[in-house]
Amino acid sequence: MVGVVAALDASAAAVVFLLVGVGALAVRRRYVTRRGGTFDCSLRLRPASHGKGWALGVARYAEDNLEWYRVFSYSTRPRRVMKRRDLQIVERRVPEGAEVFSLLAGAVIVRCRDGGEFVELAMGQDALTGFLAWLESAPPGQQV
């Protein structure tokens, strides 16, 4: 009887722990998106891998930066910050092969040069329109 009670206590503790973890993710997402200017955006963490390495995320426009946050992370800091003046679009394409299953439906992949390295972003068509408008609306004197 004591063993059953201990097992139930452990199960209840695991359920509470799981609910607190999921709740923390929801609170963090609310914290990230509360200032607006956010959109769903996946980022390829390993650009050299074919069809792999995509991470779901949320991007946020913050003045002249694009901040990218992982969806499944507890950090309140962006995983990657890209400066508008360093971003150049190199290529636009649709997902191919295994990428179709890794990305949100209707995503468009944009390969960009961020300073000296390449980064791939995947976003919906509406988010892409906003992203292109943000890139083109650089302050006077800034070359895009």
Image (spheres, rainbow, N blue to C red):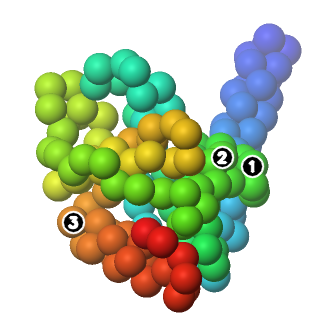
**Quarter of the N terminus within the rendering:** top right
Up-down: is 68 above or below 117? below
The reply, left or right, for residue 52 in relation to residue 1 is left
- Residue 72 seen from this side: yes
CA–CA distance in space, label 2 to label 3: 23 Å
- Quadrant holding the C terminus: bottom left
Q: Amino acid at mark 3?
A: Gln
Is residue 55 visible to us here? no
Q: Return the residue at label 3.
A: 125
- The mark lying in front, picked from 2 and 1, is 2
User: Which mark is drawn over residue 75?
Assistant: 1
Eyeballing the image, is 137 above or below 132? below
In the displayed structure, does residue 103 sit left or right of residue 73? left
Q: How many marks?
A: 3
The Cα–Cα distance between marks 3 and 1, rounded to whole angstroms, is 28 Å
First along the sequence among labels 2 and 3: 2
Query: According to the image, label 2 marks what residue?
Result: 79
Closer to viewer: mark 3 or mark 1: 3
Residue 60: give x, y in percent of width and height. Answer: 55, 68
- Is residue 124 rendered to the left or right of residue 62? left
Going by the numbered disc 2, the residue's amino acid type is: Arg
Task: For label 3, count other residues whose C-alpha is less than 10 Å away and answer few (under 14), some (14-19) or many (20+).
Answer: few
Q: Give how far across and how far down residue 41 sits, in percent.
A: 41, 55
